[in-house]
Image (cartoon, helix red, strand yellow):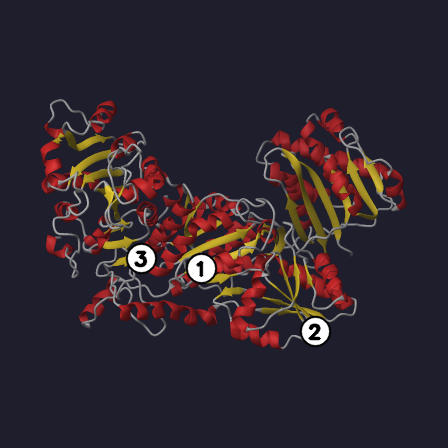
Amino acid sequence: MKDFNLLIGGPAGSGIEKSGKVLALSFTRAGYHVFANGEYMSQIRGGNNFTRIRVGETRRECHLEKVSVLIAFDQQTIKEHIRDIEEKGVIIFDGEGVSLPEGYESRLADKKIQIINEPLKKLATEEIGNPLMENVIALGIVCGLVDFSAKIMKGVLHKIFGAKSAEIIKLNEKALDLGIKLAKEKWTNDFPYKLDKAEERDRLLVVGNDALCIGAIKAGCKFVGEYPMTPSSSVLHFMAAWAEKYGIVVKHTEDEIAAVNSLIGAGFAGARAMAATSGGGFALMTEGIGLASMNEVPIVVVNVMRPGPATGQPTRTEMGDLRQIIHAGQGDPVKIVLLPGDPYECFEFGFMAFNLAEKYQVPIIIGYDKYLGESLFAVDRFNEKGLRVERGKVLSEKDLVKMKERGEEYKRYLFTEDGVSARTLPGTIGGIHCATSDEHNEYGEIFESAENRKAMVEKRMKKLKSAISDLPRALMFGKTDAEVTFVTWAGAKSACVEAAEILQNEGVRANVLQIRTAWPFLSEDVTEILNGCKRPVLVESNFTAQMGGLIAESTGIVIKEKILKYDGRPINAEFVVSEFKKINSSPGRKVR
Amino acid sequence: MTNLKDLQTKDVSNWCPGCGNFGIQIAMKQAIVNLKLDPAKIVISTGIGCGSKVNQWVNTYGFAGLHGRSLPVAMGVKLANPALTVIASGGDGDGYGIGVGHFIHSMRRNLNVTYIVQNNQLYALTLGQVSPTSAKGMKGPSTPKGVIEEPINPLRLALSSDCTFVARGFAGDVPHLTKLIEQAISHKGFSLIDVFQPCVTFNKINTYEFFKERVYKLEDLDGYDTGNLGMAFEKAGEEEGGKIPIGLFYQVEKPVYEDSDPGLKNGTPAGSDVSNVDIGELMEEFK
């Protein structure tokens, strides 16, 4: 089956996102692979929002520009997407609210596109008794068009709206049936897509941020101190929703400075602590990153990136904070920066981050873009096998008594082989110390000596070397003998993998290198891989090629060919393919 | 049984001879001894400044963090392990300047945390600039012609921010301050003690003599009611030149934050076993 694509758009507050979620979850439940991404504006009402849903039989994690079904609840959606409808596609709208641009009827006819112009609002009011049901009638039409299981979609409607009342459930079902009936009576004839699968698969529908939270909860995250910032806020909401069940303290703090410092307090006291934010909030947390590094406190901070600087584009996407997160903090703070590239890695790194934080007593930063953080993915149930919680070196009262008996003194910042000194948690008798943000000696006391300063800097830095074998290494996708290697990270990974397959089918041997740890940069690994690549092409969404720069300074390898995007919109496979073709016609050219 | 010697660190303090911080530190230690607290169950969180060095020289668990951020760290510690006694401490610049936002939110939050502010009415560690509590007209290297702004009145700010324990002490009266610290630690809720802390090096106005001539104790005042917000507000505004009240201005019982936090209903974050968290039900939600 060719992938099926649908776009539903309308003003904010009109239920576009919910309707999109109903479709995405329905197709997920039926056993399809689903990817859905939304674009919305930073306003509560009005504007133009849309959700794109891609449904298929293979795992795909980026959107396509072309759609088979366009559902338009406002004129803007028609204006921006009418040209995206494929041959034999369908456009669904309510002619009483919006209309086709002049001359379009014949153009649509040329492409054999069916026009489904139905008085949805009127039908919802008169036949169902609630004008808000217009969305559900439209979903019913889609259901009828592709022969999708009404039973599954009703189950999903029940799940998403069911909590409200039995009355609402009834109305939803009635509206869905009406839509299906309309489709069957009037238009299904020639529609080329049938989504009549209805197998039960153990799949979940999650956004990247959800996957990260599930990983964090699995890891035993017990404290969240956070301030809302798009597109990271769903992490705060998720953790708050599950706080009671899992015994997690979730504090919406007065600002991000309080957030990061509260994590540090909680981490110092022995709780696994996390905050998510975006670039602006991360800027406020920066001094705290240094504090966690200096006092050697485990914390996890997630930066879900949006276009900057300043307010930038709050609801759009960019991979533009890489430099910000790797360089956060004055005076070389030790830290680990992880870059998940898909929802499975959000889960995996969300779990792993807490082990790394406690094992090496450093702040862990997880960075990815809004496109990964807020897009919906159908995923297999996350695999918990082999996940082991490691809490690092922590001394108990018993340990301390034994040490005393051996005549050993407890020193919080003891110089060690691997740079990691054992912690004692407040409350532990025999382990009293002061964790001090001034340079300190092994006891934690402020100490100005030059010799001690040098040794302490080296001790902290040593931890990064010790951690290297635990860090996610760069991954290759595709065949090894490629002519072209797309080098990328985070939310652009999936687009590159699909682009490589498209090119492969067109006779260009292409593969993908995904960087998964940004700091400490795994130079040896990446150098070795890149030395084996014939023609690396960098793909990332920022102006200055931040990953390209990091690779160059860490490995000495300068990737000259670049595909960069900085319009606030996500990179997908089609974009990578078309931009590659442009540079291919003039090698060495930088494409923006 | 804890005694003063147990609270002594190997390292000795390096404040200027005669610094008000000595009195505050002695009062803190004495209060811990009098309350029979175990030093291992106490965390003193501080910011940056002369007074913030207090946890370097009191032998409890300590966290010396960033300028103005002693309260958020204290919050994290307290919420992660509510069984600990948590004391935050810092100067007037730290708490009423750079950290004033956290100060206000901490008060409305009403965590069971004690906050002791060493208020010397200037920035000492950075060599004598004026602070948010410096008197109008006071001169310093950053304001050679004198302060133009009105000073913050920390007690009035606290009283209007729903602080449940508002007190003022004087570093020159250690027994009185000790008593206040004991009351503050025993108080269930957020407690503020603003302490007049003469800076013998830079502050030539607010000296020991200055305060000794002026301070009087609210408890010696006939009919003073610590449950009367209006009376507290009036006393907190008593002008310089006249007499300055010290003591407990206001105290009220209100639910503390940690008792209502849903995440703390079934255990303590810092102590919990996380080796095998079951996420089965969680994943079901996404099907």
The residue singled out by tag 3 in the image is A437
* Among numbered discs 1 and 2, the one appearing first in the sequence: 1
Give the structural element (helix, strand or loop) at label 1: strand
Q: How many marks?
A: 3
Q: Amino acid at mark 1?
A: Ile
Chain name for mark 2: A
Position of A169 with respect to A122 (left or right) is left
Q: CA separation, marks 3 and 2?
A: 50 Å
Q: Is residue A118 left or right of residue A433?
A: right
Q: Residue at x 79, y 50 (%)?
A: A194
Circle nearer the viewer, 3 or 2: 3
Q: Which residue is mark 1?
A: A364
- Gap in Å between the C-alphas at discs 3 and 1? 18 Å
Q: Quadrant of residue A516?
A: bottom right
**Amino acid type, callout 2:** Ala
In the rendered structure, are the residues bearing label 3 and label 1 in contact, judged by CB atoms less than 8 Å apart? Answer: no
Observer-nearest residue: A539 or B109? A539
Query: Where residue A379 appears, x then y in whole percent?
Result: 61, 56
Amino acid bearing label 3: Ser
**Labelled pair 3, 2 in contact (Cβ < 8 Å):** no
Please check whether the numbered discs 3 and 2 fall on a single chain.
yes
Picture disc at residue B190: none
- Which residue occupies the foreground of this view, A211 or A469? A469
Report, in whole angstroms, how far the alpha carbon at label 1 lies from the one at label 2.
34 Å
Identify the residue shown where x is 25% and y is 23%: B230
What kind of element bears circle 2? loop
Q: Nearer the viewer, mark 3 or mark 1?
A: 3
What residue sits right under mark 2 in the picture? A482
